[in-house]
Image (cartoon, coloured by chain):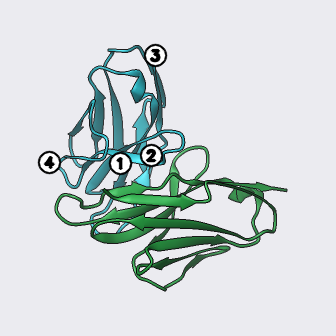
C-alpha cells in the first residue's frame, strides 16, 4: 500500500522565520511528487518534482526531492502571514491501473504570526 | 476560464438519502478525479477517470458510484448516504502525462 507521511503535523512561527516541511514516501512505481498549498478552499499547486537533487524555486518557496532516501522538503524563507495554510505533499504512482493516482500525506498546518 | 467547478457548495442529507455531486472542467483535460478530505487524513482518492469512457476505483470507493458523462463532466453519486460520508469532497482534473491536478472549490457534505 502506498504511503506518504508529512512532518511536522503543525508548526507555529513568526514572520521572517524560515521553515522546512518534510515529506517521506513509500510508493510502488514512483512517478512524481507534488506539493500543494491549501488555504480555506481548494489545494493550489506549488511544485512537481520528478528528479533527485534538482531544486525547484518560486519566490521564497523551494523544494527538492531525494529519490534514494524517498523524501522531499519544502522550504519557505522569510515567512509572511499569508503563508499560513495547510501544505500537502502527494506522490503519483504509475503502472497498470495506477495512472495519475495521487496519494496524499496528512498535511502540515503552518501558522505564521505577525 | 472557470477551471474546475463543483455543485453544490454545501449539502445536508439524512441517512439513507441519495444525491449526486456534479463536477465540470473547461480546460480540455482528459483525466478527472474525486477525493474526500477528512480532518487529519489529507485527501483520499474515491474514483478517477483517466480518460473519457473509463472509470476506476481509488482508495475509498465503497458507498460511491461515478459517471464520466463526457470529457467535461464527472459526477459522484451517493446512493444511500451514511454519517461516515460526512466530509469535504473535491473534484480535480489534469492533462494526461506529467501534469499537476487542478482542484475545484469543494462540496461540504453533512449526513445526519
Secondary structure, mark 1, is strand
* Residue B104: image tag: 2
Labels 3 & 4 near each other (Cβ < 8 A):
no
Residue furthest to the right: A114
Of mark 3 and mark 2, the one earlier in the sequence is: 2
- Please, which chain is the residue tagged with disc 4 on? B
Question: Which residue shows up at 72% across the image and 57% down it?
Answer: A82
Q: Which chain is cyan?
A: B
Question: Which residue shows up at 27% across the image and 39% down it?
Answer: B61
* Residue B25: image tag: 1
Q: Which chain is green?
A: A
Mark 3 vs mark 2, foreground winner is 3
* Residue B53: image tag: 4
Q: Which residue is labeled 3 in the image? A: B112
Labels 2 & 1 near each other (Cβ < 8 A):
yes
How far apart are the two marked residues, 1 and 3, measured between alpha carbons?
30 Å
Give percent across and percent down for residue A38. 57, 52
Labels 3 & 2 near each other (Cβ < 8 A):
no
Badge 1 density bin: few <14, some 14–19, many ≥20, Cα 10 Å: many
Give percent across and percent down for residue A88. 52, 57
Amino acid at each position: 500500500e502506498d504511503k506518504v507521511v508529512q512532518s511536522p503535523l503543525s508548526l507555529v512561527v513568526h514572520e521572517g522565520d524560515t521553515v522546512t516541511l518534510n515529506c517521506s514516501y513509500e510508493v510502488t512505481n514512483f512517478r512524481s511528487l507534488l506539493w500543494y498549498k491549501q488555504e480555506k478552499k481548494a489545494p493550489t499547486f506549488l511544485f512537481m518534482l520528478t528528479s533527485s537533487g534538482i531544486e525547484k524555486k518560486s519566490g521564497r518557496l523551494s523544494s527538492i526531492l531525494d529519490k534514494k532516501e524517498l523524501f522531499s522538503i519544502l522550504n519557505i524563507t522569510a515567512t509572511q502571514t499569508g503563508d499560513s495554510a495547510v501544505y500537502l505533499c502527494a506522490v503519483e504512482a504509475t503502472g497498470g491501473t495506477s495512472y495519475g493516482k495521487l496519494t496524499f500525506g496528512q498535511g502540515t498546518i503552518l501558522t505564521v504570526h505577525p | 476560464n472557470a477551471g474546475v467547478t463543483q455543485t453544490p457548495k454545501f449539502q445536508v442529507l439524512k441517512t439513507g438519502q441519495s444525491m449526486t455531486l456534479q463536477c465540470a472542467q473547461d480546460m480540455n483535460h482528459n483525466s478527472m478525479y474525486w477525493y474526500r478530505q477528512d480532518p487529519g487524513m489529507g485527501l483520499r482518492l474515491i474514483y478517477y477517470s483517466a480518460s473519457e469512457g473509463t472509470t476506476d476505483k481509488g482508495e475509498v470507493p465503497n458507498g460511491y458510484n461515478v459517471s464520466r458523462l463526457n470529457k467535461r463532466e464527472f459526477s459522484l453519486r451517493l446512493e444511500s448516504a451514511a454519517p461516515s460520508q460526512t466530509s469535504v469532497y473535491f473534484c480535480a482534473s489534469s492533462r494526461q502525462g506529467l501534469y499537476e491536478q487542478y482542484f475545484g472549490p469543494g462540496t461540504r457534505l453533512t449526513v445526519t
